[in-house]
Image (spheres, rainbow, N blue to C red):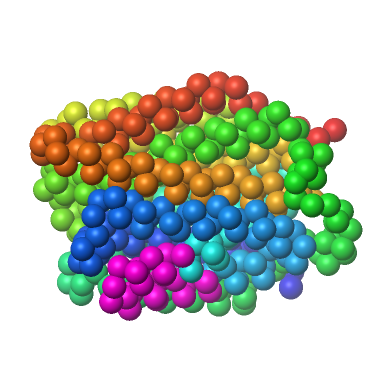
Amino acid sequence: MKSSKKTQLGIIFLTILINMVGFGIVIPVLPFYATEFGATPFEIGWLFGIYSLVQFVFSPFIGQLSDRFGRRPVLILSTLGTAAGFLVMGFSETLLMLFVGRIIDGVSGGSVGTAQAYIADITGPEERSKAMGLIGAAFGLGFIFGPALGGVMAAYFGHAAPMITAGVLAIINALLIFILLPESISKEQREKLPKEKLFPGLFRHTRTAEYVTCVTTYFMLITGFSIMTAVFALFVANRHGFDEKQTGYLYAMLGIIGVFIQGGLIGRLVKRFGEGRVATVGAALLAIGLFFAPLVSGLGALLLACAAMAAGNSLTNPTISGITSQCVDADWQGRALGVLQSSASLARFLGPVIGGWLLHLDLASGPGNYAKSPLWAAAAVLFVTFLLCLRLPSFKKTSARP
């Protein structure tokens, strides 16, 4: 199967878009769905986090499998696993079954790291951050359509309906990958890969200091953002009176900002200022938005704080991924980006657990303080991220290694 680079990037964009629409459907609904089964805020934090804890364990090995057996089969299998997880959640009758569905999804959740490796396979270093922005744009579009669709479906058909819809979308996604996406690394290339273990072999194929800085920075970024994500739907419900539908529309607005930045603007910004500076500004915007979100009372001020968070994440996430890919030898992209996503998975576990715990503490301090502690904790983590971003390298037209 042959296709142009532009076509391959388009197919990757489409597959991630469908994946993220399914993921976005669930975000504004899951906290309310879990409360139907009597879940506490702390248990809701674990429900968000358990997916990522399992993914933390499996992501590096999924990246290694994609280096060994190809990106395409790993994308297909991980997407089918996502479908199974969503369907189990949709047909759950107990909180335990919700957790089982999240765990199934987490075990198979290697699609983003593998998609990043696919992009790294077919792009040069000078265009990689812009290409990685395609994944960010797909995230953004997923957050436009997914949460809005999930909120509307939950309002009219119940909380289980978005989960089942996400499962069906994942099945469609797997079929599209099977039919349309060619493999990005040949059998000959895979057979030439060194038979080294992931560790310590990874550090012999990376610019170690720069790679570790990137992974650490990404970990802090995702930790702070995940603290916010786990409590945000409950925050706007309790502090601003939003229901599932309105929360979905708010996420859609954030997605529009993400698409605008990552779909085109970020390439020009990186070309002019370099990835490190763009990531630094993004982390600062995220920290500022998170700090002011619990302090504002009007809708306009809330939207402004949310816009800062959306813009900050859109500037920081793809640039760190792009820098990381340029610190790694070409035939270790899958493993290196798998480790990056594994660090993000650990962060997505810790963030919701911390957020749920802090939110539980806030319940005793009155409605005016609802979610103040987790959002300010997230702002503090993002301030640390900002400091780490100051140490990120900026690659423009250089290869990963001499």
Residue 393: percent from left, percent from top: 65, 26
- Rendered position, 79 above or below 46: below
Q: Please give the name of the residue rendered at 10% of the width and 36% of the height, measured from the top-left corner.
A: 366
User: In the rendered image, is residue 271 in sight?
Assistant: no
* Quarter in which the C terminus is drawn: top right
Tell me if 225 is positioned left or right of 77 in this view.
left
Tell me if 22 is positioned left or right of 333 in this view.
left
* Quarter in which the N terminus is drawn: bottom right
Residue 159: percent from left, percent from top: 24, 69
Q: Please give the name of the residue rendered at 30% of the width and 43% of the height, measured from the top-left corner.
A: 357
The secondary structure making up most of the magenta span is helix
Tell me if 402 is positioned left or right of 70 in this view.
right
Residue 375: percent from left, percent from top: 29, 35
Q: Quadrant of residue 178?
A: bottom right
Q: Please give the name of the residue rendered at 54% of the width and 37% of the height, measured from the top-left corner.
A: 218
Q: Please give the name of the residue rendered at 85% of the width and 60% of the height, measured from the top-left corner.
A: 189
Q: Which residues are magenta?
A: 80-103
Q: Nearer the viewer, residue 53 or 110?
A: 53
- Rendered position, 92 above or below 34: below
Q: Nearer the viewer, residue 131 or 50?
A: 50
Q: Quadrant of residue 243?
A: bottom left
Does the magenta segment cover residue 372? no
- Rendered position, 18 above or below 370: below
